[in-house]
Image (cartoon, rainbow, N blue to C red):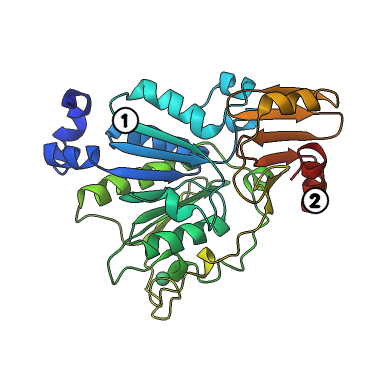
Amino acid sequence: MHNFNRYSRQIAFRDIGQTGQEKLLSSTIAIIGIGALGTALANLLCRSGIGHIRLIDRDYVELSNLQRQTLFNEDDVTNNTPKAIAAAEHLKKINSSITIEPIVTDVNAWNIEELIKGCDLVLDGTDNMGIRLIINDACVKNHIPWIYGGAITTTGMSMNILTSEDAPCFLCAFPGAGAHVSHDTCSTVGVLGMIPSIVASYQAVEALKILIGSEDIRRSLLYMDVWSNDTGQIDIKKNLECPACVHREFTFLSQPQTPYTTTLCGRDAIQVIPFGKRNINFESLSKKLSHAGNVKFNKFMLSFSDSTIEINLFSDGRAIIKNAKDENAARSIYSEYIGY
Ligand SMILES: [Zn+2]
């Protein structure tokens, strides 16, 4: 049984009440990306009593994250804890009466539908357009609402992508997003810690409205610049020729499944994903690698470094490689040290 006293101030707000709280407790959400937006979202929504929260992230905690990723601490940096795991550990101490489900993985066209299965709502905590287009395709296809959020420098944006017939989708709002390559990342132009917290707060309040079926759900694209004090809303029209929400052609989901590499946004690092799921034995691999450099491992990740490179390997075979000069070099490093 739930102790509703925990949520008494939220229940006292008449638009939520006991009925709304019960709806929240029986809801399942996924937060994709547990960085600055994702930690703020997870913190607020865990405290609000969303019954089941799935936390999905591919990365681990680093010192430069602490300025804005508000669930993490220095122990998480020292322990190289994967973000989803670290967030789940902290959230369980905040609310042990709900289900927190951490998943350490890259989100891509081949696994997203499985990852969002059973969700009433998906929240975007990612930092790049490519993944958002995949989220959009998967959510529109499976009739799951999702909430876009973006934050960079001192600016932020958010939009609800709803499942009703007349609602525009993310591709309606950003038709050129597929070809859009932005060179601005948090590491090149920076980001203040406050802006992702503000955007995530807007996303979180819309999440409550969507989950309880409120009539006050925002139907525009919200933007703000907290430095120049500029805030507004843009009406987005449904594109009657939209490939995703009108023609239901989900091109971003139909990429062929191959081993692949991606340069991680805002990081001097490249991710390598070998084909198929593998189960890596960290103990035997660390013995082998200890002759070549420094190795340490925990339950989730093995870290290897020598004078030139650093490899962080997850047990499913996925690796994040630092100091590789390009994606080809990263693949060679992977095959040399870990092997395909
Ligand atoms: Zn659309």
Picture coordinates of residue 226, whole percent (x, y):
48, 45
Real-space Cα distance between discs 2 and 1?
A: 42 Å
Q: Which residue is mark 2?
A: 326
Task: Give the numbered dot on residue 239.
Answer: none
Which label sits in the foreground, 2 or 1?
Answer: 2
- Assign ligand 1 to one image quadrant: bottom left
Left or right: 216, with 174 as reference point: left
Left or right: 199, with 45 as reference point: right
User: Which quadrant of the figure contains the N terminus?
Assistant: top left
Picture coordinates of residue 255, whole percent (x, y):
58, 65
Look at label 2 and name its amino acid: Asp
- Residue 282 shows in this picture: yes
Picture coordinates of residue 179, whole percent (x, y):
61, 68
Picture coordinates of residue 153, whole percent (x, y):
58, 46
Please tell me which of labels 2 and 1 falls first in the chain.
Answer: 1
Q: Residue furthest bottom?
A: 241
When the figure is inspected, residue 121 is found, relative to residue 96, above or below; the finding is: below
Q: Residues within 10 Å of mark 2 (few under 14, many from 20)?
A: few
When the figure is inspected, residue 297 is found, relative to residue 228, above or below; the finding is: above
Secondary element at tag 2: loop
Q: Residues within 10 Å of mark 1 (few under 14, many from 20)?
A: some
Left or right: 322, with 265 as reference point: right
Q: Which residue is mark 1?
A: 47
Q: Residue at x 50, y 30 (%)?
A: 85
- Residue 70 shows in this picture: no
Secondary element at tag 1: helix
The reply to whether the C-beta atoms of the residues labelled 2 and 1 are less than 8 Å apart is: no
Quadrant of the image occupied by residue 93: top left
Look at label 1 and name its amino acid: Arg
Quadrant of the image occupied by residue 205: top left
